[in-house]
């Protein structure tokens, strides 16, 4: 049996039933079910004579599941229920129809719950009524229990009506049967009309998106409640969903297959939607625009350091948010202004505590301040009343793509300072591409509880290849060409380079890139499993320990396909 619920019209619960058996339990005795979770707003509380003086209604004795009274369609007035004497009814939903159970005005304060069979609950509990859909080609009978809600007894009425399913006369479209992700219908760009999607019968389409191309699906008509969702080729990862418009951009170097799923949002009556959409595959207007010079700064672990001033001509896209890091002295205000045209994409700004584990999350309450209007430009202001200087991270993100999924902006900051504390500066960015076609990205975050407080992570690496981190006393840019990449740690005397690959010590960072290109630690030196917690002491001559005010330089080496080697970008960290 399949059962799904949703909010129906007039706020009542709408249910969709798919039953294979037409049986109603006839247990000889019934017992009071457990207390149901109350999820609906209650109706007016019953008030009247003492329950002991009120007679039972004419449908008694229907006090157990086994003595449920059948109710026909129509109005059933003058019913009475006691807390010690619940009422049970069996109601038949016609085939391919919507049954509406309504409690007319004046009904007492009651709860109603559906069961199939006895005391196997298949609906919510409502004090306002139900809409129950039976999309099957046969009628179905369901049991209902009525009991008082906030009183010892209640008078009430039930009004039952049924509406035929208009989809009985609607034929399937010519694309059936493509009802699961493993068997999608290939589609080329174009306009598609007179499509039909039914309850429990979604439609799946496969679209090829070339490198640097954008896929857009725009609904042009919908008779009921069709909804759209994009998936990757295996339907393991969602690329976005919406009732009328979805889009995705292939930022890779190879063609990708994208799955479009169309489903019936509300599993009620009518049991189908006829719909149409335009499918557009075009060169992405954003990938032709080069990243700004402050990239890569796409995560809270690798923000670009900034100070007071204005940065012009910055770029942000739906797949590449921008993160900036600065410091706010105690008792001072930080003011941020992002200037942009809203019509090209709605940009929002958020401010976070750099050491907070929720840094970068737009969950309610995770940020210190934010600007999220739907107009041109955004501003935020935050006063540091913590009593100490605080490192903060600013997120600039595209909220609602408009004409294109990217936008340009200018960023003005005032109130920032060069406070004492870790300052992370990426360099040699971007590194030369690895075998995936992307450069391996090293990101760093300070303020974690383990070891020195510095955590290193690497993403976009070649899956399955081994890697470990390096530390140096100086920086080299653009670096020394080695293998397929560049070593960006200075080798000229008196500089030194240390390797975090010493087995059995905190100096071992040996790991491997997983299938998503994320560096996973194999040495037990990361409390998170991925990345590496940098120890306080370093694998250099004299075993130096990291001191406040010092700057150290870090980079990742990794094996490359066909036995070559490569590197990530590097970071300079001032502790």
Image: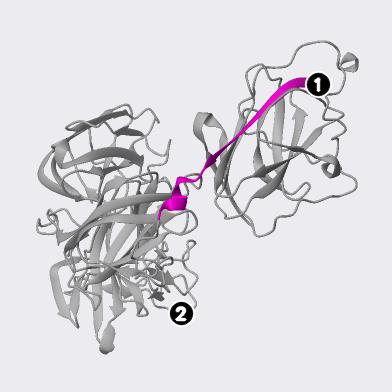
Mark earlier in primary sequence (2, 1): 1
The stretch drawn in magenta includes residue 158: yes
Q: Is residue 548 visible?
A: no
Q: Secondary structure at mark 1?
A: strand
- Residue for point 61% across, 54% down: 138
> What is the magenta segment's predominant secondary structure?
strand
Q: Along the line of sight, which residue is nearer the eye, 496 or 534?
A: 534
- Tell me whether the residue at label 2 lies in contact with that at label 1, contact meaning CB atoms closer than 8 angstroms: no
Start and end of the magenta stretch? Answer: 154-170
Asked if residue 28 lies left or right of residue 69, the reply is right
Mark 2 vs mark 1: in front = 1
Which mark identifies residue 223?
A: none
Q: Which residue is mark 2?
A: 503
Q: Is residue 196 above or below residue 553?
A: above
Q: Quadrant of the N terminus?
A: bottom right
Q: Along the line of sight, which residue is nearer the eye, 317 or 241?
A: 241
Give the image location of residue 414, x and y in percent: 19, 32
Asked if residue 82 lies left or right of residue 314, the reply is right
Give the image location of residue 418, x and y in percent: 23, 41
Q: Which residue is mark 1?
A: 153
């Amino acid at each position: 049996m399949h059962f799904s619920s949703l909010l129906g019209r007039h706020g009542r619960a709408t249910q969709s039933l798919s039953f294979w058996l037409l049986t109603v339990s006839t247990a000889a005795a019934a017992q009071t079910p457990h207390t149901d979770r109350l999820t609906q707003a209650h109706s007016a509380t019953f008030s009247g004579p003492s329950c002991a003086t009120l007679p039972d209604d004419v449908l008694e004795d229907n006090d157990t599941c086994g003595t449920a009274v059948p109710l026909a369609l129509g109005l059933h007035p003058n019913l009475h229920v006691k807390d010690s004497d619940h009422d049970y009814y069996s109601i038949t939903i016609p085939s391919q129809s919507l049954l509406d159970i309504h409690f007319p005005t004046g009904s007492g304060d009651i709860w109603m719950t559906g069961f199939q069979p006895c005391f196997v609950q298949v609906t919510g509990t409502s004090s306002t009524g139900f809409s129950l859909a039976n999309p099957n080609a046969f009628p179905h009978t369901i049991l209902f229990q009525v009991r008082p809600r906030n009183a010892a007894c209640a008078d009430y009425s039930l009004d039952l009506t049924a509406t035929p399913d208009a989809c009985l006369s609607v034929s399937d479209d010519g694309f059936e049967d493509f009802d699961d992700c493993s068997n999608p219908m290939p589609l080329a760009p174009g306009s598609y009309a007179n499509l039909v999607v039914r309850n429990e019968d979604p439609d799946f389409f496969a679209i090829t998106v070339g490198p640097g191309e954008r896929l857009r699906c725009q609904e042009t008509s919908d008779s009921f409640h069709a909804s759209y969702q994009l998936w990757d080729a295996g339907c393991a990862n969602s690329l976005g969903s919406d009732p009328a418009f979805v889009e995705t951009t292939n930022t890779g170097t190879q063609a990708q297959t994208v799955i479009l799923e169309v489903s019936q949002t509300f599993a009620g009556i009518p049991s189908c939607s006829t719909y149409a959409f335009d499918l557009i595959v075009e060169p992405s207007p954003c990938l032709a625009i080069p990243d700004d010079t402050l990239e890569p700064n796409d995560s809270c672990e690798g923000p670009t350091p900034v100070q007071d001033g204005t940065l012009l001509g910055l770029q942000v896209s739906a797949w590449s948010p921008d993160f900036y890091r600065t410091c706010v002295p105690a008792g001072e205000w930080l003011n941020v202004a992002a200037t942009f045209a809203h019509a090209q994409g709605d940009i929002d700004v958020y401010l976070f505590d750099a050491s907070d584990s929720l840094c970068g999350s737009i969950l309610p309450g995770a940020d210190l301040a934010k600007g999220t209007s739907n107009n041109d430009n955004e501003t935020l202001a935050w006063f540091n009343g913590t009593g100490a200087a605080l490192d903060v991270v600013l997120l600039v993100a595209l909220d609602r793509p408009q004409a294109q999924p990217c936008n340009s902006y200018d960023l003005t900051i005032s109130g920032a300072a060069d406070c004492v504390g870790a300052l992370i500066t990426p360099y040699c960015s971007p590194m030369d591409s690895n075998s995936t076609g992307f450069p391996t990205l090293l990101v760093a975050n300070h303020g974690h509880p383990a070891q020195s407080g510095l955590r290193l992570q690497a993403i976009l690496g070649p899956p399955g290849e081994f890697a470990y981190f390096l530390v140096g006393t100086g920086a080299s840019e653009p670096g020394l060409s080695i293998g397929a990449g560049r070593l960006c740690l200075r080798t000229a005397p008196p500089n030194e380079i240390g390797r975090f690959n010493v087995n059995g010590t905190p100096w071992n960072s040996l790991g491997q890139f997983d299938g998503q290109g994320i560096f996973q630690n194999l040495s037990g030196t990361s409390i998170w499993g991925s990345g590496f917690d940098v120890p306080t002491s370093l694998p250099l001559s004299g075993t130096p320990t990291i001191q406040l005010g010092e700057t150290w330089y870090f980079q990742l080496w990794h094996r490359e396909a066909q036995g070559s080697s490569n590197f990530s970008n590097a970071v300079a960290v001032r502790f």
